[in-house]
Image: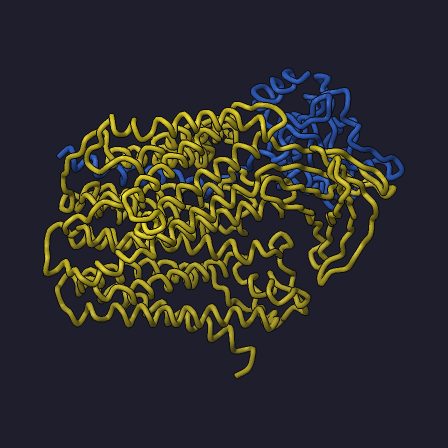
Chain colours: A blue, B yellow
Amino acid sequence: MTRRLILLLPLIGFLVLAVFLYQGLSLNPFHRDSALMARDFPAFNKETLKDPEQRVDESLFLGQVTLVNVWGEWCPECKREMPQLLDLADRGIRLVGISYKDTREKGMGFLQDFGDPFEVNIFDPEGDLSFELGVYGAPETFLVDRDGIIRYHHTGYISPEDIRKHILPEVGKWQ
Amino acid sequence: MSIQMIPEIGHFALVIALLLAVAQTVMPLAGATLRRPLLMAYARPMASGQFLFVAIAYAALTASYMLDDFSVANVANNSNSMLPWYYKFSAVWGNHEGSVLLWSLMLAGWGFFAARYSRELPRDMVARVIGVLGAVCVGFLLFILVTSNPFERLLPHVPQDGADLNPLLQDIGLILHPPMLYMGYVGFSVVFAFAIAALLGGRLDAAWARWARPWTNLAWAFLTIGIALGSWWAYYELGWGGWWFWDPVENASLLPWLTGTALMHSLAVTEKRGSFKSWTLLLAITTFSLSLLGTFLVRSGVLTSVHAFANDPSRGFFILVLLGITVGMSLLIFALRAPRVSHKTSFNWLSRDALLLINNIMLVIITVTVLMGTVYPLLLDALNLGKISVGPPYFNALFVPLTVIMCIFMGLGPIARWKQTEVRSLVKRLWLAGVAALVIGITMPFVIGPEWNAWVAIGLVTAMWIVLPMFRDIFEKTRHASTRIAGLKKLSLAYWGMQLGHLGVAVTIIGVAVVSNYNIERNVRMGVGDSAQVAGYTFTMTELTSRRGANFLADRAVIEVQRDGSRRSFTMNPEKRLYIARGMPMTQVALRPGLFRDLYVAMGEDLGDNTWAMRVQYKPFVRWLWLGGLLMAGGGILAVADRRYRRLATSEDPETAPGPAPAKEATA
């Protein structure tokens, strides 16, 4: 009898897994870690969102711990995320945005409507800088340390809980 | 017949194939149960017919691609009139619908060959094997016809041109990687069918194991090549220089490989010693189930990755149902019937049997850790415990030490004898190899690296510990022959296959250890005339040009590379391409491959003023990763070619000689 039960174990294990897979079908997919973890922020030279005349490059990140947030006007999760980003800016954390696959007007409109926690926004209409970063979609957030090295990667929406649990400890670690 | 009809013919052929597959399932399985030879005789013709009609459907889709028939949605979305012909040919499987069709073609193909090369098997066994394979085909053909029809038309508004193939997939790697991988995945369906047939028939003897082994080895060899190709492709095509990302889909291919490896070894014990029977059956079922799980993960959208196809929840649900029926039924049959085939034998705790058991346990533990890491985020999410990401740190922290432990036993296994091995003789034959492995492994990092590194040393000791006892064993086996050469010739192909496979593992381990720890990477800003120094090489940009390819525009850098202290120099040409139809930028890496090091230059961002962000890397021993994979696959194929499988198969009819077949002299 016990042998019978042991032989049933694989079936039971599989059924449990199948239940989870079924639930997984209705959940948001999950992103993996950036391939650029612990590496230099990719070199770039881009216009800022506000001013086509002003250009920024990777030296932007030297000397200060920075949260880099990839966002787009077309992305509803980014709108939900804004209050948390404003909260982070209030705490004195430096934020830099990457305006991902947007036009200037839409990007500026977004900041007017939902607030602007960013010191500066890098304009990335083709998404090629974001491609270099390994971004799959918005929002995604990278923590860059004072030497310009990527230290932490958050995919998807940042909840108030994420700030307390992940973002603040990570920022503290590298500051 | 006009071009416009081709897709309809393909679609119709798929429907016929489905009907034939239903017949291939129902008739032989019913015949085997009711002992009706006439019904069982349906097996072979139905399997052949089904293969033929799936092949017609596949050829029809390929023809639509080659002839640029953009009225077919699949062609319009994934091809373009400017695409070179070989990419049109491979674009067929560069998308969800086409790749499932390729899956089905291969499944039908394996079924066809299993039917063809099983003349000497008992009739009811053949009927059951082919019936089970037919059932799997029914599932996949239904999946195609219901949710993923590749022949869907865009009528009457036919697009002028196609959207082009994703530039990432326009590469020799895509031509080769998926077919090899699928051949491996699907190939395990044969041993799966053998396992279910054995459970249904209640008969599992040495002849059965001998039949299942070549099919398993072959599928495993394909899967090994497929995984190695995938890793190689990621290395030069994704532009990051990584070769394994622990991406869910990579893991999905690694899982059946791990259990497949365990299965090969367990089958050896079942054949030689008649033990581990239930275990072998369970592994056969698990391996194919994991292949199916991999398909589910890629196509359902529950996990995202570079590999994921455009997702549709209805597809995910369908595959889950398919997975549930196939795996659930198999495991239920296993639970109910396994006691009938089990057979007890005794062996000592120091014997090849025991060492193979440990190998199996280790492989299963590794499989479970990788599986957990892959689905853990999903489990947490489903339980509402938040979203987490399991990254390379988790996998490396578990996979590396577990592999090292397994390799310790791997050095012992081939030397040990079946049933019982004397400790003294084992020590006598191994102490020298052990000492030599330690000495070589600890000293070599000084020679190949900039500084001594403990991980490299561990890797090298492990690799040597696998290889040196092997040499010693070959030396011993040929000692009594008249000449060494004669002795080497007398060793069976299966034995050489095992040795080659193990050598491959050692070579891969060396590659992994060295490249992971001695890899040098620099990101530099370069304009014409600028140079950078990496690992004793000077990289100088001499020119920036642009060129036009068949369907892309490219910025191209000419980099002159000179090794310090050497006069000779060579050039490398990395490119940044813009694929016109999709407007998608792509990095074309410049590689200077070598057995002991690769030089790797990739163009990043255009920084303006004719300067570019360049990624320069020095990758020692990276080729060994894939070389090891090829050796492993070679070992698997060599073992299939062993005479034993053909000779004994014809001389022994298990129906006239019931009971366990006499165990052959243990050489492999």
Q: Residue furthest bottom?
A: B1
Q: Residue furthest right?
A: A53
Residue B104, percent from left and from top:
41, 61
Residue B504, percent from left and from top:
44, 43
Residue A25, percent from left and from top:
45, 43
Residue A112 in sight in this render:
no
So how many labels did they put on this image?
0
The residue at 65%/19% (across/down) is A171
Asked if residue B229 is positioned above or below residue A40 in the image, the reply reads below
Residue A126, percent from left and from top:
74, 46
The residue at 69%/56% (across/down) is B582
Asked if residue B468 is positioned above or below residue B125 in the image, the reply reads above
The residue at 50%/35% (across/down) is B510
Residue B555 in sight in this render:
yes
- Judged left or right of residue B42, residue B593 is right
Residue B194, picture quadrant: bottom left
Is B182 in front, or is A136? Answer: B182
Asked if residue A151 is positioned above or below residue B627 in the image, the reply reads above
Is B666 in front, or is B207? Answer: B666
Is B315 in front, or is B620? Answer: B620
- Judged left or right of residue A11, residue A47 is right
- Judged left or right of residue B555, residue A142 is left
- Judged left or right of residue A22, residue B387 is right
Asked if residue B629 is positioned above or below residue B395 in the image, the reply reads below
The residue at 51%/26% (across/down) is B455
Residue B38, picture quadrant: bottom left
